[in-house]
């Protein structure tokens, strides 16, 4: 079985969607190998989003990440499935912009935000969940977040 990293972001916790989202994963045949509630610190979230911060050219993007995540709780998951789990999970959670996500995806089903509105308002889009975008990222993110 291959595994990937998934983070249920602060907005998923604020909206009490954690158990529903995890149940959706399980009903779709995914196995939750590990689950942990984590209070986010600045060093970890900056390491996590380092590549994205470098790639995205929005003024104040790094500060927005810090504002949304630091001292907030997230639920981190290591998820397994007998297939290309990274690609499968990314399809299952849906497009980054909840307004454009498949209605059967996590973001399509539970999302209540729009990327364009978020950018216009100078904030991060509330899209509930992060999933690794490659096998290498998955292993790095699992090592970063599951400190043992």
Image: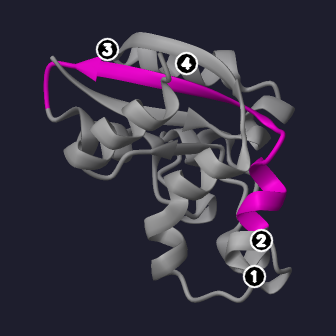
Nearer the N terminus, badge 2 or badge 3? 3
At 51% from the left and 52% from the top, the residue drawn is: 48
Q: Is residue 29 left or right of residue 17?
A: left
At 41% from the left and 40% from the top, the residue drawn is: 141
Is disc 3 placed on a helix, strand or loop?
loop
Q: Is residue 127 above or below residue 146?
A: below
Q: Is residue 83 left or right of residue 95?
A: left
Q: Find the distance from the CA under tag 4 to the CA under tag 2.
A: 29 Å
Q: Quadrant of residue 123?
A: bottom right
The answer to whether the residue labelled 3 contacts the one labelled 1, judged by CB atoms less than 8 Å apart, is no
Residue 29 disc label: 3
Q: Find the distance from the CA under tag 1 to the CA under tag 4.
A: 32 Å
Q: Is residue 52 above or below residue 27?
A: below
Q: Which residue is mark 4?
A: 22
Q: Find the distance from the CA under tag 2 to the CA under tag 3.
A: 37 Å
Please tell me whether mark 1 or mark 4 is closer to you in this view.
Answer: 1
Q: Which residue is mark 2?
A: 63
């Amino acid at each position: 079985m291959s595994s990937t990293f998934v983070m249920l972001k602060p907005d998923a916790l604020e909206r009490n969607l954690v158990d529903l989202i995890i149940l959706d994963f399980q009903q779709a045949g995914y196995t939750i190998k590990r689950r942990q509630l984590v209070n986010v610190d600045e060093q970890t979230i900056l390491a996590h989003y380092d590549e994205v911060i470098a790639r995205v050219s929005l003024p104040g993007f790094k500060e927005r990440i810090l504002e949304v995540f630091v001292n907030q709780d997230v639920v981190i998951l290591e998820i397994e499935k007998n297939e290309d789990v990274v690609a499968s999970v990314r399809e299952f959670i849906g497009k980054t912009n909840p307004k454009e996500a498949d209605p059967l995806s996590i973001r399509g089903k539970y999302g209540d935000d729009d990327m364009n509105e978020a950018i216009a308002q100078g904030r991060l889009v509330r899209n509930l969940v992060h999933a690794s975008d490659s096998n290498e990222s998955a292993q790095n993110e699992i090592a970063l977040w599951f400190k043992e």
